[in-house]
Image (tube, helix red, strand yellow):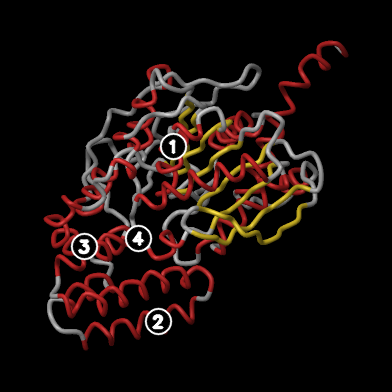
Amino acid sequence: MVAALAAAAPFVRPFVRGLSFVVRAANLDGAVRRAADLDTQQTSERGIALPTPRGTLRGRLYEPAHNTRRTVLLTSGLHPAGINEPRLVALARQLAASGVAVLTPDIPELETFAITPAITDTIEQAALWLADHANAQADGRVGLIGISFSGGLSVIAAGRPALRDRVAYVLSFGGHDDLPRVLRYLCTGFETGPGRLMPDAIGAQTRPGVAAAVSSAAPSGAGEPGGYRRPHDYGVAVILLGVADRIVPPEQVEPLRTGVRRFLWASHLDRVDKPQADREFEALRALARQLPEPSATLLGYVNDRDVVHLGARLLPFIGFYGTDASLSPSKSPMPDAPVFLLHGLDDNVIPAEESEYLADDLRGHAPTRLLLSGLISHAEADQPVHVEDVMRLASFWADLLDR
């Protein structure tokens, strides 16, 4: 029995580490949280200057006190708070507590919602610097983790020649495969539906000894693929920023963009300072009444979170927007490093079908593990907790954290 337990320990330990991380990342409490906290170490944080060909960028490095298992580049999605976004900070801290050193790069375009290939280029450059300088492991490889929009871009960066043999793995958390398809969804609410690929059809792989908790089965009540799912208002507001110069007269472009950016900032405040958010939303309603047409109507749609009418106005203008190959994994060379795809089953910012499509595109190029989870909304574990979902998510993170 002792021999059997000793033999099993190397395989059980990664799952325990993954379960501890999930419990902490999902902010569960009670006895299970106290037990999970036992599997952590002290961490430290410091700002760093990240040199790139475009100039020096700010970054923040989260380091375990000892036993660093891997160093990763963690890139945020499109968000006005950048590397200070509370959920990004919480994720970085929990990864560091699990023995993973984390660098979060402050990429300006992500804070200003500018969908441009410069983001992909900066992810590539930051990853190269990290592999060369910042506590990279003896194999000289780093992990790439991208949240939301940066998930797909991290996959693209990992497939570029400069990063080949420098990447240990890539995690796309709520990311996309084809940006134009996502933009169409945000404007219409209709998913094309790849048919909910089964795990054995996408070459899902796992490390020996770690249970293969790969799931693409929808829980009861989930939306059917190929149907309508009301898109999140955040996404159409971002599209309006990008196409404003095509939809309103030149003199109205910047006033309209200023109003939309204020709305997106107020949406962030709504999570951290609700009274201030309410005041900002009220000011935006007054601003909409002062703007000339058509900006007044468009900002009114944004304020009212009217994705139906706003999406219909934007749809004719998205054909030129976001079509660069550097913005869609479906149009770019695939990496050969292992790729992990994690997506909320009912995500209405970037649909879960995008990770299914990406898994299909990766077939034959890279070992791929896909998990569509009912525990996750959009890149955040904030849905009602079910034991089965927790176990699957724990196995997924166990596999990743053991690399």
How many angstroms separate mark 4 from mark 2 (CA)?
A: 22 Å
**Regarding mark 1 in the picture, which secondary structure is present there?**
helix
Mark 4 or mark 1: which comes first in sequence? 4
Amino acid bearing label 3: Val
Q: Position of residue 13 (x, y in %)?
A: 74, 28
Left or right of 41 on screen, residue 104? left
Left or right of 370 on screen, residue 90? right
Residue for point 43% across, 18% down: 203
Query: Which residue is more in the foreground, 305 or 116?
Result: 116
Residue for point 46% across, 23% down: 366
Image height of 172 relative to 279, above or below:
above
Query: Is there a contact, CB below 8 Å, between mark 4 and mark 3?
Result: no
**Quadrant of the rendered image containing residue 246:** bottom left
Image height of 391 relative to 90, above or below:
above
Residue for point 35% across, 47% down: 350
Mark 4 or mark 2: which comes first in sequence? 4
How many angstroms separate mark 1 from mark 3 (CA)?
A: 26 Å
Amino acid bearing label 4: Ala
The residue mark sitting in front, 1 or 2, is: 1
Q: Quadrant of the C terminus?
A: top right
Q: Position of residue 170 (x, y in %)?
A: 51, 35
How crowded pointer 1 is (Cα within 10 Å; few <14, some 14-19, many 20+) is rated as many
Query: Is there a contact, CB below 8 Å, between mark 1 and mark 3?
Result: no
Residue identified by numbered label 4: 114
Mark 1 or mark 2: which comes first in sequence? 1
Numbered label attached to residue 183: none
Amino acid bearing label 1: Val
Residue identified by numbered label 1: 155
Numbered label attached to residue 280: 2
How crowded pointer 2 is (Cα within 10 Å; few <14, some 14-19, many 20+) is rated as some
